[in-house]
Image (cartoon, helix red, strand yellow):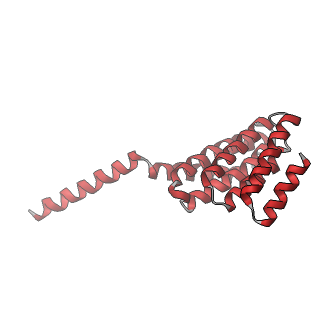
Amino acid sequence: LEPSLELGLGQQELGDHRAAVSAFDQALQIMRINYGLFHEAQVPLVESIIFSLMEMQEWEAVDQRFDYLAHLYERLYDTDDPRLETGLQKISSYHVNAFNINLEGRGEYHLRKAANLFKLRLEVAEQTLTEDHPRLDYLHESLELSRAHLYLLSNSYRERVKQAQQANRDALLADLR
């Protein structure tokens, strides 16, 4: 385990991110064998893999590793554990940023991921924070905002806009006659 971790970190420092990911993947497999499928020690390792994948702009692989990281957090911590919300915060931030820049043209995908994460984070926060904690307001607002944006991206909304435009056009044409 130790040599694979050191090799991965060394390759990362040299900018050889492909070799770093390979070494980190090997370390991850060794870690799973030694400590079980789900162990806290995997978190920084998966984060290192994600960093290198981002540097290589391998966005689909980044998404997959973030999905695994979310799954890992959910397996490690119950919904009454604030560490779950803290871990999911990093992942939802990535998806919000990816939505904002429409990374790889997959903005809606990232928005859906963020909305699901906000929902889960809110569940955790409601169990672990006081009722007047400002993070609850933030999570409520973030969830509502993501749902509103998802509605704006939906076919239902597009159809309503199309119908409204058609009605406006028809009204203008009727006035011209």
Task: Mark yes or no: residue 97 visible.
Answer: yes
The one nearer the camera, 170 or 48, is 48
The one nearer the camera, 121 or 22, is 22
Please provide percent x and percent y for residue 10: 84, 61
35 left or right of 112 in image: right
The one nearer the camera, 59 or 150, is 59
Residue at 77%, 56% (x, y): give it. 20
Q: In which quarter of the image is residue 125?
A: top right
Residue at 65%, 46% (x, y): give it. 64
Residue at 80%, 51% (x, y): give it. 23
Please provide percent x and percent y for residue 40: 84, 42
Q: Which residue of the protein is positioned furthest toward the right in this rendering?
A: 2
Q: In which quarter of the image is the N terminus?
A: top right
Q: Which residue of the protein is positioned furthest toward the left in this rendering?
A: 177
88 left or right of 172 in image: right
Residue at 73%, 59% (x, y): give it. 17
The one nearer the camera, 102 or 2, is 2
Please provide percent x and percent y for residue 128: 79, 42
Q: Quadrant of the C terminus?
A: bottom left
Please provide percent x and percent y for residue 142: 62, 53
Q: In this view, does 4 lie above or below 127?
A: below
Q: Quadrant of residue 97?
A: bottom right
Numbered-mark total: 0
Task: Mark yes or no: residue 77 visible.
Answer: no
